[in-house]
Image (cartoon, rainbow, N blue to C red):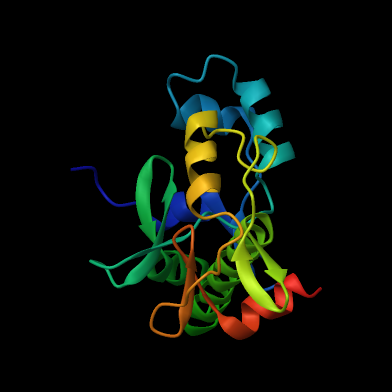
Amino acid sequence: MTAPLTQEQIKTALTVQGGRIVWATRTADFYASSFSKAYDPEGAARHWNKNSAGKPPAWRFDKIKADFTCTALLRQLSLKAACAALGVSYEKQNLLTAQDQQDKREETAKGVVLRCVELSGGVPVWRTRTRDSHPKTSQSVLDDFNARYAGKQVRPRKGLYKISYNQVSEAQLRAWLEE
């Protein structure tokens, strides 16, 4: 098992901007000292600063730790440890992170609903699937789905619609489809 990150390491990896924890900028020296296999430290630093610096980490909720975690410097880092090292309020960061996760889930569910369901006579029905709407699905599977389900009513389960593993309330489904 690897040792947890020290406060100094956390401060070099993360920073606070606008009240949020985000990735810090990196230098070529940082890559050369932290990642021994970085064959192009200058290019790696340039790429990082362009694509990742200033953006929040990809926090995931870890049920075992009962906290959000991310991968920083090739190690797992908890939100509590990051807040302690950076001197910010854990409660505020936890609320912001939880809201970000909820927003991402809703955005994903909305995209799935718009791609898979349509209103027909005020009733939600399965939309016909095509290569454009489902490019990674084989044509035989698309044909099978279209023969069995396309145009048929989407039935709620326990008051919620389950569309491609996303649970959506009827109010959300109707609001998104009527936009």
The correct choice, above or below, for 61 with respect to 70 in the image is below
Q: Residue furthest top?
A: 39
Which one is nearer the viewer's eye here, 123 or 168?
123
The correct choice, above or below, for 91 with respect to 27 in the image is below
Task: From the top left corner, tell me how far across and down residue 158 is, in percent.
Answer: 38, 83
Residue 82 in which image quadrant: bottom left
Tell me which residue sits at (67%, 22%) in the image. Answer: 43
In the displayed structure image, the side of residue 56 where residue 165 appears, left or right: left
Task: From the top left corner, tell me how far across and down residue 46 is, in percent.
Answer: 71, 30
Task: From the top left corner, tell me how far across and down residue 134 is, in percent.
Answer: 60, 40
Q: Residue furthest left?
A: 1
Tell me which residue sits at (39%, 40%) in the image. Answer: 74
Q: Image quadrant for the N terminus?
A: top left
Tell me which residue sits at (43%, 22%) in the image. Answer: 36
Q: Residue furthest right?
A: 179
Q: Image quadrant for the C terminus?
A: bottom right
In the displayed structure image, the side of residue 3 where residue 56 appears, left or right: right
Q: Residue furthest front?
A: 147
